[in-house]
Each structure stands twice: as structure tokens, then as C-alpha cells.
Image: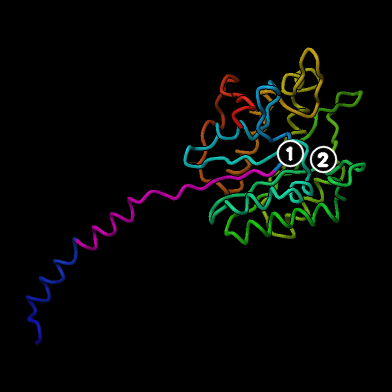
Amino acid sequence: MSLTRRQVTVAAMAAVPVALSATSTAQAAPRRTRTLYIAGDSTAAQKYSDAAPETGWGMALPFFLQKDLPVANHSVNGRSSKSFVDEGRLDAILGLIRPGDFLLVQFAHNDEKTADPTRYTEPWTTYQDYLRRYIDGARAKGARPVLATPVERRKFDASGNAVPTHGEYPAAMRALAQEEGVTLLDIQALSIALWQQLGVEETKKYFNWTDTEQDNTHFNPPGAIAVARLVARELLRHRLLAPRDVRRLDAEIPESWITWPSPATV
């Protein structure tokens, strides 16, 4: 039976609220929470009360990200790009990571240990080969890999110039990032520039210098916060994150926000 023009018009008008309602529901649906995974070494890792005031920059990164972008920090003391994989830690991340998540990778400090075959990698061969595993693994899961050159140690020459300590590893990572089309956060270059700006004495306030220890590799709360700020700014600058994803980039972060849980709770 054919419909009259009036019946067609009434039917069309009756359908409009349903369509609008569906559109409104779709627009109101919250964004899926993305997670930023970190694979790295002790400079980024979570520290516990028995190590305080030592602080990994991954502990401070959440202060600069909105709450709907949680950080899953899988970094572990003493690991290299090789040992992290060999111990199954990359597989553990890949078992959790989902499409739209990020995998931020920072290694080199322990890759440089030539006397330890369980950790050592050669910059232009095995180091790049292992980093490719992180890249390929993240991409296979629909996640986005991000490479970060290793944060610099505190080292100055007799003239007060900050000295690079990572040899060819940063250059090898930069070349790999370009070859693979992966976003690179050049934290090595940014951190050595910051140490140069601060100078020999002021940088002591950013590293784990205590009455009993003079540690020029690991950070205390101010150092971890400063490096995490560099990371967050680079994530924004490279448009991996939108302005709505970050916060407090220029704000003072109280040291008291850093906490060290008891090892017994791990």
C-alpha cells in the first residue's frame, strides 16, 4: 500500500528525535582511557622507602598529565634494552597494552656496561635490534611507540661544561627513530642543556646527593620533577598529547607530592 505525502512527512518527523537522541548519546560517551606505559631503567623507575630520597622521573610524570591518562611505569633498576626483553618484561607490557595506548622506551645507561653480557648492547647493531622489538610489539597491539634518548648524568669538565656520557647510544636511537618513523623525545639533549644552565653546584640539588652518597646518575625529587616536566613538554610539542591531556607544565610542583611506598606493599 502506498503512503500519502502527509504520512511520509509524519514518519520522517517522528524519526528525528530518535536520530538526535542517538547522536547525543554518542557525543556524551566518555573517551576511552589511554595509558602511557614506560619501559626503562632506574632513572625512570618507581623507588621505595628504602631508597628515598632517590626518585625516578616516571614517579613525577603523572603530575603533568590529566587523570584520564594514567602512567603504568614498568621501568626497573639495572635493566638494559636487552635484559628487559630477556626477562619477559616487554612481553608483560604487550600482554596489557591496548590500541591507542603509548609505549615510551628509554634505555642506554645499562646497555653501556661492556663487561656484562646479560645487559650490554652495541649502539648501532644490537641496541637498535632490541629497540625494534619494542616498536614492533607496540605497533602490533595498535599502540604507539615513543623513543626517548637517555637522560644525562651529572658530569662537568674542569671548565664547568656539562659533558655527555652516553657515547653513541643517543645518536643510534635518533637514527632508528627516523628510520622507523617513530616519535623521538630527545631527553638527552634537553637534560644536558638543563644541567649546563644550572651549573656545577646547583645540579647537586637535582641528583641523589646525600650526606653519605654522591650519586650523579639518579635523581632526588626536584630532579625527577624537572626531567618529568621535560618529558611531558616533549609529548605535547610532538603532538602525541593534546593541550587538554597535560597540566601544570609551568607550575611549581611541591617535593612533598613525591612518596615512596614501603617495599612490603609491592
Q: Which residue is mark 1?
A: 41
* Camera-side residue of 98 and 182: 98
Image-quadrant location for residue 255: top right
- At horizontal 54% and vertical 46% (from top left) the residue drawn is 35
The image shows residue 79, relative to residue 202, as above or below, that is below
Query: Which numbered disc covers residue 81?
Result: none
- What residue span does the magenta drawing correspond to? 18-39
The residue lying furthest to the front in this view is 264
Answer whether residue 25 is magenta in the image: yes
What's the residue at 57%, 59% (across, down)?
142
- Few, some or many residues within 10 Å of mark 1 (<14, 14–19, 20+): many
Residue shown at the point (85%, 49%) measured from the top left: 121
Gap between marks 1 and 2 measured at Cα: 8 Å
Query: From the viewer's perspective, is 117 left or right of 144?
Result: right
Locate residue 257 relative to residue 203 in the image: left or right: left
Residue 149 is situated, as x and y percent measured from the top left of the image, at 74, 43
Element type where label 2 sits in the image: loop
> How far across and how far down the image is residue 110, in percent?
82, 40
Kindly identify the residue that appears in the image at 53 percent across and 54 percent down: 100
Give the structural element (helix, strand or loop) at label 1. Answer: loop
Q: Is residue 226 above or below residue 78?
A: above
Query: Which three-letter amino acid code belongs to the residue tagged 1?
Result: Asp
Of residues 183 and 49, the one nearer the viewer is 49
Residue type at numbered disc 2: Asn
Residue that mark 2 sits on: 110
Mark 1 vs 2: CB contact within 8 A: yes
Which circle's residue, 1 or 2, is located before the other in the chain?
1
Measured as percent of width and height from the top left, residue 67 is found at 48, 37
Residue located farthest toward the bottom when viewing the structure as drawn: 1
